[in-house]
Amino acid sequence: MDRHPRPFDDVAECVEATLARVGPRIGLALPLGIGKPHAIANEFYRRARRDRSIRLQIFTALSLELPRARSELERRFLAPLVDRVFGDFVPLDYVADLHAGTVPENVEIVEFFLEPGAFLDSPHAQQHYISSNYTHVVRDLMNRGVNVIAQVVAKRAAPGGTEYSLGSNPDLTLELLRRLSARREAGALVVIGAPNRQMPFMHGPAVIGAEQFDFLVEHPRYETDLYSPPNARLSTIDYAIGLHAARLVRDGGTLQLGIGEIGDAVVYALQLRHQRNQEFREIHRLMRTPERFATAPAAIGGDGPFETGLYACTEMFLDGFLELYRAGILRRRVYDDVRVQRLLAAGTVGESVDGDFLRALPAAGFTSPLTRDDFGVLQRLGVFRTECRYDDGRLLGPDGEEVDARLDDPRCVDRMIGTCCGRRLRGGALSHAAFFLGSRGFYAALREMPEDERRLFPMCGVEFTNGIDDEDRALKVAQRAHGRFVNTAMLATLLGAAISDGLADGRVVSGVGGQYNFVAMAHGLPDARSIIAVRSTRDRGGRVTSNLVWNYGHVTIPRHLRDLVVTEYGVADLRGRSDQDVVAAMLNVADSRFQDSLLREAQAAGKISRGYRIPDVHRNNMPRALEEQFLLPRARGLFSDFPFGTDLTREEIVLAEALGTLARRTARPGGKLRAMLASLSQRRIPTRVEPYLERMGLGAPTTGEERRWRRLLARELASMSPVR
């Protein structure tokens, strides 16, 4: 079968050719996140919408969309921002129809991870959602009739011909290509690549040859902007959680982070621990961490700078991992030979190649004299120079000098060092990740990074990053020393279960993704821990409720996998503890406004004694007290709203805060009327708020409605102290 991909410069022609090959029943697999070729997806969807004889099933996850305004004020705020930040990003037509409820009957949109909170009110999205661990998705798709795979790829010229990289999304595509190879050989599968120069060319297993594609759609009009959400504002709560989590990370260990503000806060706290260690310790003193949680965090992790550094094994490659790399924290390299990796993990050898390194190899499992295969492994890792050759138990140096390949003979070892050996190991990785999503600056940093540096961050399949129970188990265990897997939950029960993906009524907020994978892995690896981060409360419509609850109608992580739970008020170490001790530890990190009612529920269930009292040291878990602990560090310039920068302008930062406060205020019963009446009392609009009103197009209102919006927003802005 011809393996030269057929080129197209028009998506309509490509879709027509695909239909001609596989017929009118299309099972279209699209990658999660930014790997989707939106123009191709839209053309398949539009064809199915026009021609009801086509049966289209789209299998994907995280179908991203531009921010949607919920009010006229939000629309005025978002429109210029979206144009500036998202550029010519092409929206997905099926996402708009999911919201409108107009997906045609001959189309199914099947996702295993939804954009968080976006489709709670979409019956189609809720009904066709697949609840599946990330590592099981390919298995679950195999019987669904996938016959088309389409993906955005990176492309480059190489000495052997054109090379392609799956870029942001080797996560599932690599395994799909392997498992569907027979279907492709039979002509029942079409693989479509969409090269885009904005997609960073990532190395590792993500690099594939042109023969992997049947069709390539390539034209400048399809090389549109990748989805790039602006960095989110970090709150005091986020920072406090990050500080507690950073104290649980072990130097020389392994780190995984989930997406979102808390992941960014953990990155910031790790930087603070490493670069400004005295201030890191001081803020913990202000938070009374040593007094409130005397031994657990220090025993599990540490609070000193990172001398050995960390390695990242993570589902998602976050912007923050580049920040850790730049800070000198992400610097522990791992290698793909288990014997060498075990020597490094034990501290028996370092990355320098010397006599001690060679003499340690036999005890690790290398034969003496070396076999051809073992020589090849060591040469690939940089132990032997590329010019060195192997010949029947002897090594031939670049100058023709021969030496027996004996590692148990000191004279041979000395001669190897002088004639055949490199100076340091090469080919190591600082991280392994399965997909990425980030800001425009993050994508640009990856594209512009020198190639040798970019090779330190290989992208691979999710079956590698998210599990250990396969043929690579020994290697993964050796690489993932002291694993710390940090993920976020919406709620947690007092018995240690976590709720991260769905509501009690069954509606899906997002998806389990890889969270269960990493929690299970933490229990399967020696010296590893799962860290579930939960904000202790939430404010919805002006009503504050606890995110720590006695019970809930749905859980993502069951209580038997409970481990470490972190809120802004501290760390609850739950692993291997009895139910009564778990309840007590969870109460210690709950908001004090809810501690008594939670305690009563636990007592009513007989899970803690009637006479139990929450220790006084944990009875002031209040937002105001937390804010006070951050006053001095903030005065020193720490814990800014956007520590890693933002695409928002100064005016937009202030407006976002004002609009958020106004939305919460008007969401309360009678809130809209009270806000409107209060705005009428404002006789004069302060000069200092005029630039913000201009940005909202309310500098010179022409209608009564615009004048009401102007008064409402001006009052909110004027009440902010100060307007920054």
Image (cartoon, helix red, strand yellow):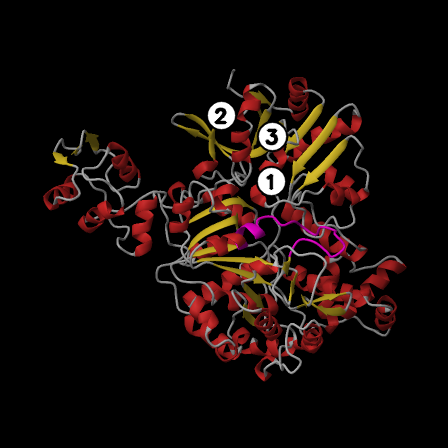
- Is residue 597 on the magenta stretch? no
Label 2 environment density (alpha carbons within 10 Å; few <14, some 14–19, many ≥20): some
Q: Residue furthest top?
A: 1
Dominant secondary-structure state across the stretch colored magenta: loop
Dot placed on the residue nearer the N-terminal end, 1 or 2: 1
Label 1: which secondary element:
helix
Quickly name the residue at label 1: 137
The residue nearer to you, when weighing 134 against 213, is: 134
Q: Which residues are magenta?
A: 500-519
Label 3: which secondary element:
strand
Q: Is residue 396 above or below residue 678?
A: above
The residue nearer to you, when weighing 357 against 437, is: 357
Q: Is residue 551 visible?
A: yes
**Place of residue 158 in the rendered image (x, y in percent of width and height, measured from the top left):** 41, 29
| Residues at marks 2 and 3, CA–CA distance in whole angstroms | 15 Å
Q: Residue furthest front?
A: 606
Tell me: 674 left or right of 286. Answer: right
Label 2: which secondary element:
helix
**Residue 210 numbered mark, or none:** 2
**Place of residue 108 in the rendered image (x, y in percent of width and height, measured from the top left):** 74, 35
Tell me: 339 left or right of 104. Answer: left
Tell me: 446 left or right of 590. Answer: left
